[in-house]
Image (cartoon, rainbow, N blue to C red):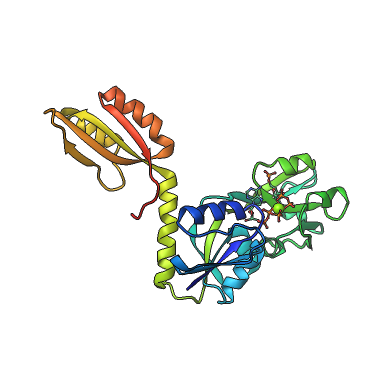
Amino acid sequence: MLRIAVPNKGSLSEPAAEMLHEAGYKQRKDRRELVLTDTENDVEFFFLRPRDIAVYVGSGKLDIGITGRDLLLDSGAQAEEILQLGFAGSTFRYATRPGTATDVRDFGGMTVATSFSGIVSRHLAEHGVDASVVHLDGAVETAVQLGVAEVVADVVETGSTLRNAGLEIVSEPILHSEAVVVRGTDAPDDDPKVRQFLRRMQGVLVARRYVMMDYDIRAEHLEQAVALTPGLESPTVSPLHDQGWVAVRSMVRTKEAQRIMDDLYELGARAILTTGIHACRL
Ligand SMILES: Nc1ncnc2c1ncn2[C@@H]1O[C@H](COP(=O)(O)OP(=O)(O)OP(=O)(O)O)[C@@H](O)[C@H]1O
Ligand SMILES: O=P(O)(O)OC[C@H]1O[C@H](OP(=O)(O)OP(=O)(O)O)[C@H](O)[C@@H]1O
Ligand SMILES: [Mg+2]
């Protein structure tokens, strides 16, 4: 049975559960459930604190887990990311009161407050900066106002939390994060159960990013139309009863679907339809 660690709360929890549900796995009905066995899919889910997931997986006690790249890197666990899941996207950045610093090198002698002391200590050392790091559990922005630190290092999505605290970003992001699937670095990379899980999750990613597009076009415009809808490999082209016309079926990116429909219509295509993809294996 494949043993998977899943975030039990926070920003990662709901989107992870949604994605697993779309991939056909059973999900817990009560947020207090700690373990859930999905016998039909031969999988056991362990609902754990997001911060602890890389540690469990790195120790080899669980096969894989869903966590944030930032949490993985901060943990220092013997685990590595094997699939990017495209949600909980954020950057990890330094911020100070305006006028305090313009670069990491200005932090010498200052105190940096963060919940990610592993990442921050490493980053400061890599830049040869001698600053103190104070570890806080959350709401680190307030540390500047209360005089605990001059600098904070925290997760930034829109930047509004920092702005509301009167802080401004200093220097380039320390890292870009998103939700990822992790596996122990010592785990075999050919475990068929893990591979099947990854294929299911990749199927969800593709189903979310693509739609199926169908249209009819006069045969003489087929090449131009196919250039607009090349598909992942090659579109399906079928003859219509009405000679001189063909039907085309191709996958297109959801984000580009409306523009492509406009362009196809201009080219003379008709009966242009898009339909959602529910699941897939490529
Ligand atoms: N506002 C946000 N936008 C995008 N990702 C975020 C945001 N806040 C946290 N994350 C991501 O969520 C993960 C942190 O999860 P965690 O549950 O520890 O924190 P949280 O979502 O802030 O929840 P908590 O309420 O417990 O602080 C990290 O990977 C982080 O990058
Ligand atoms: O750039 P923004 O869009 O403002 O988002 C970033 C904020 O969101 C998270 O905080 P959360 O609300 O989870 O509170 P926390 O500090 O208790 O984790 C994160 O820790 C940042 O503080
Ligand atoms: Mg938080």
Residue situated in front as seen by the camera: 194 or 135:
194
Q: Residue at x 64, y 63 (%)?
A: 33
* Residue 53, position as x, y percentages in the image: 61, 66
The picture quadrant where one finds residue 259 is: top left
* Residue 197, position as x, y percentages in the image: 44, 63
Q: Is residue 233 visible?
A: yes
Q: Residue at x 22, y 29 (%)?
A: 217
Residue situated in front as seen by the camera: 120 or 281:
281
* Residue 72, position as x, y percentages in the image: 60, 64
Residue situated in front as seen by the camera: 141 or 35:
35
Residue farthest to the right, as pictured: 146
Residue situated in front as seen by the camera: 219 or 80:
219
Image quarter of the C terminus: bottom left
Q: Is residue 77 visible?
A: no
Q: Residue at x 51, y 60 (%)?
A: 26
Q: Does residue 155 lie above or below 63 as drawn?
A: above
Instruction: Give the total number of marks visible in the rendering.
Output: 0
Along the horizontal axis of the image, is 88 left or right of 186?
right
The picture quadrant where one finds residue 114 is: bottom right
Q: Residue at x 35, y 29 (%)?
A: 261
Q: Does residue 252 lie above or below 60 as drawn?
A: above
The picture quadrant where one finds residue 237 is: top left
Residue farthest to the left, as pictured: 243
* Residue 126, position as x, y percentages in the image: 65, 63
